[in-house]
């Protein structure tokens, strides 16, 4: 009798577990469908593009009347990436013309101030409304001041090989499980559907069902695979979203550059943030509409 009861209990537990898995996936899929944002993904193609083209690394564009951007100690920043905004069709509130640039310090933490992600001593976001096609790469490079003798050499940084940024058509991206709003929205739906299995927090359940939700964890978009390079949409992190609290108003993914390990034939990867990490820039939507890039949060994390 005891053995029969144990078998019955085991079967009930298996059935309950299946119900938990199925409901968790159903709710996650619902949130993915209900909360969508447009984004432009892009790929990287090795090679030095034209001066004004979209690129990661390489020689930046600078107007003739603009000096080379410097860090808080007077050393030269380096171009992380620049995006020709003509390729951002379908992204609301993003500029559709001009050039958007992301500059960072080439040093051990790549210019991030982890105590204040908006501190521009180690990075800069620049927007050029127009570009002068007569400016040459030689003119721009001549503006670059020398690095301090004890600084990192010019080849050190997350971008190992200059690459062309190739934007793809804008698509709708669903909310992922990393979004700070996800736990509360999930619990609201769960407790309404299963008051008999009421939950007060998300993480315990997530640990149980994580393998069933893995395709919603990184991107909120089943079928998408790394690398997760994009503008707009929902961000991806290897750790967690740093915005809750101090940076909650920075609600737009201005730029995201993931690590991309690919054999380039030059003995290195394309992009590498620490131990296979990802970098993000965030901005407030109203500031983006005004083309005000003075307050941007820049961060990166890795495994």
Image (cartoon, helix red, strand yellow):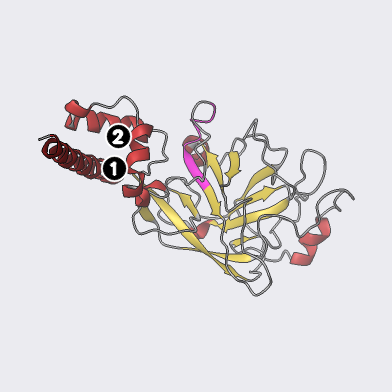
**Mark 1 neighbour density, 10 Å: few (under 14) some (14–19) many (20 or more):** many
User: Which residue lies under the disc numbered 2?
Assistant: 186
Q: Position of residue 81 (x, y in %)?
A: 62, 56
Q: Is residue 113 among what the camera can see?
A: yes
Mark 1 to mark 2 CA distance (whole Å): 7 Å
Q: Which of 101 and 96 is in front in this view?
A: 101
Q: Position of residue 21 (x, y in %)?
A: 25, 43
Residue at image point 72% right, 63% down: 135
Q: In this view, does 242 lie to the left or right of 174?
A: right
In the displayed structure, 253 sits above or below 48; it is: above
Q: Is residue 173 among what the camera can see?
A: no
Where are the magenta residues, as a range?
246-254
Q: Where is residue 198 in the image (x, y as percent from the top left)?
A: 24, 26
Within the magenta stretch, is there residue 213? Answer: no
Within the magenta stretch, is there residue 253? Answer: yes
Residue at image point 63% right, 63% down: 52
Give SS at disc 1.
helix
């Amino acid at each position: 009798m005891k053995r029969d009861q144990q078998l019955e209990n085991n079967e009930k537990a298996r059935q309950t577990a299946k119900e938990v898995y199925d409901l968790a996936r159903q709710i996650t899929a619902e949130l993915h469908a209900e909360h969508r944002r447009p984004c432009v993904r892009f790929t990287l193609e090795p090679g030095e593009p034209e001066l004004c083209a979209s690129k990661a690394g390489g020689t930046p564009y600078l107007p003739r009347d603009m000096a080379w951007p410097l860090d808080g100690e007077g050393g030269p920043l380096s171009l992380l990436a620049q995006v020709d905004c003509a390729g951002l069709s379908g992204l609301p509130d993003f500029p559709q013309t001009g050039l958007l640039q992301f500059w960072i310090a080439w040093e051990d933490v790549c210019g991030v101030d982890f105590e204040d992600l908006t501190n521009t001593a180690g990075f800069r976001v620049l927007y050029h409304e127009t570009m002068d096609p007569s400016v040459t790469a030689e003119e721009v490079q001549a503006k670059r001041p020398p690095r301090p003798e004890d600084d990192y050499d010019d080849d050190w940084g997350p971008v190992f090989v200059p690459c062309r940024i190739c934007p793809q058509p804008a698509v709708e991206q669903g909310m992922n499980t990393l979004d700070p709003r996800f736990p509360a929205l999930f619990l609201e739906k769960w407790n309404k559907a299963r008051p008999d299995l009421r939950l007060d927090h998300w993480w315990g359940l997530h640990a149980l069902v994580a393998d069933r939700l893995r395709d919603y964890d990184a991107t909120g978009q089943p079928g998408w695979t790394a690398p997760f390079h994009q503008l707009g949409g929902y961000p991806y992190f290897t750790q967690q979203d740093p915005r809750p609290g101090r940076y909650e108003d920075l609600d737009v993914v201005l730029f995201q550059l993931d690590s991309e390990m690919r054999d380039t034939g030059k003995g290195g990867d394309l992009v590498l943030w620490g131990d296979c990490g990802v970098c993000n820039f965030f901005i407030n939507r109203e500031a983006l509409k005004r083309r005000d890039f003075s307050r941007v949060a820049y961060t990166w994390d890795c495994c």
